[in-house]
Every structure is written in structure tokens, then in C-alpha cells.
Amino acid sequence: MSGHSKFANIKHKKEKNDAAKGKIFTIIGREIAVAVKEGGPDVNNNFKLATVVAKAKAANMPNDTIERGIKKAAGDANGANYETLTYEGYGPAGVAIIVKALTDNNNRTAADVRSAFSKGNGNVGTPGCVSYMFDEKGQIIIDKEECDMDADDLMMEALDAGAEDFQDNGDHYEIITAPEDFEAVKKAIDAKNIPTESADVTMIPQTYVHLTDPEAIGQLNRILDLLDESDDVQDVYTNWDEEEA
């Protein structure tokens, strides 16, 4: 199946600041806590937890740290209750930005997000102001070097499991699903022992914005970097075509 997707640009990943491993581990730790509280500590019977654990291992989080996080969440009934929040707004030149946060302090998170937008000449908008520009999709990225299966066989495996699209993006394969089909497709890929570089339900822009003004690019990067600094912020999605920067 053909098509072009800038999967590397769909999400402004915190891994951009790879030196800040502690911050990444804090974020994943919260996701583990939420997954355990929602579905229990058994990875085999809690798909959400299994997905977070896979993300943790991809970020090189030590196994004992992962296990401690699961045990702590399972045994700590009085632990922090994290709430999922979504902010939408605009960066310079009208770039659409969606911020997903997981927090135990709404006021702190709101202040961090508004400050980031303000310092980068952007503004936080009302719910729904930019989300209509994105499609929520399950997305699985597979490194070709890590995949022993033939591309056609992998495509058929994914499509048979319910995937909407399969794309060959040079050194990666990309599988796109409806959000409700993501779990089934991911399990089908895992059953074939195919390692995934990333697997998550994400927000994919319908169209991309091209920036040529160096000042606007700098301001947008300022917003994204400040959002990265907040432990509450889990994911940031934009429709900026970074490849054109």
C-alpha cells in the first residue's frame, strides 16, 4: 500500500533530549502507575501495561526499575491519582499544537503549558480548536534491520489483523490502524516476535505546515523545548513539517 507519512515528525518526542533520561523515566513511571491501576499488574492480561513496558524497554529503562514501578503501583492504594489532560493551541505562523499531559496537579500543568506557549509567541486555545486537523490512529513503527519477515508477508499479517494501511518508509515499516484495532494488530505483530521501534495511539496531521521564517522556527522550537522540560507533559503533536526546516 502506498503513501508517504512523515512518521518521525508526528510527535515531537522527548527522546530529542536524550540526555534527560531521568525525565523520560519519570514520565514512563507515571504511565506504568496509571496502567496498573486501570488493568492490574499482570503484563500478560493488561495490554496497556504491556505497551508501556515495551516503551520503557525501548527507552533503556532497567528491568528492575520497571518491576519496582509495577509493584509500587499495585501495592500503593493511596498513591497519586494522575489525570489525563489535553491542551490545544497555536504556535507561530498558525502551527497547530496538541499537548497531552498526565498530572496530579492541574494548576501546575496549566501554568507550565501556558508559559511555554506564551514564551514562543503562541497561544493556548479552546478544546477542539486544532484537534480537527488531526486523525487519531494507532501507529506501529518497525525497523527494517530488526525485522526478518518479508515486507509482503508483514503487510498481509498486519492487514489480516485489522490494520488500515502499511507503508514502506525507507528504513522503517509503518502500520496504521483505527484506535480500536490497535491492540489486535499489535498483538498479531508481537505473536510473530517482530520487535517494534514504537507502538502507540497517536495524532496524525491531515496536512503539514511548512515554515521558512527562521524567527518562527526558533519560536516554535522554544515552545516545544519548554514543553519538554515539564514532567507532566507526556506527548506533543504538531502539524509542522520539520523536514522542510
Image (cartoon, helix red, strand yellow):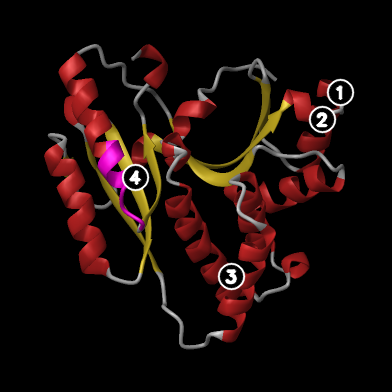
Identified at 31% across, 16% down, the residue is 210
Mark 2 = which residue?
154
- Mark 3 to mark 2: distance in Å? 34 Å
What stretch of residues is rendered in magenta? 224-231
Could you say whether the residue bearing mark 2 is in a helix, strand or loop?
Answer: helix
| Left-right relation of 113 to 164 | left
Q: Which numbered tag is attached to residue 150? A: 1
Give the amino acid at mark 2.
Answer: Leu
- Mark 3 to mark 4: distance in Å? 22 Å
Mark 4 = which residue?
228
Q: Is residue 178 visible?
A: no
Identified at 26% across, 43% down, the residue is 226
Q: Earlier in the sequence, mark 3 or mark 2?
A: 3
Labels 1 & 2 near each other (Cβ < 8 A): yes
- Whether 226 is among the magenta residues is yes
Could you say whether the residue bearing mark 3 is in a helix, strand or loop?
Answer: helix
Quadrant of the image containing the C terminus: top left
- Mark 3 to mark 1: distance in Å? 37 Å
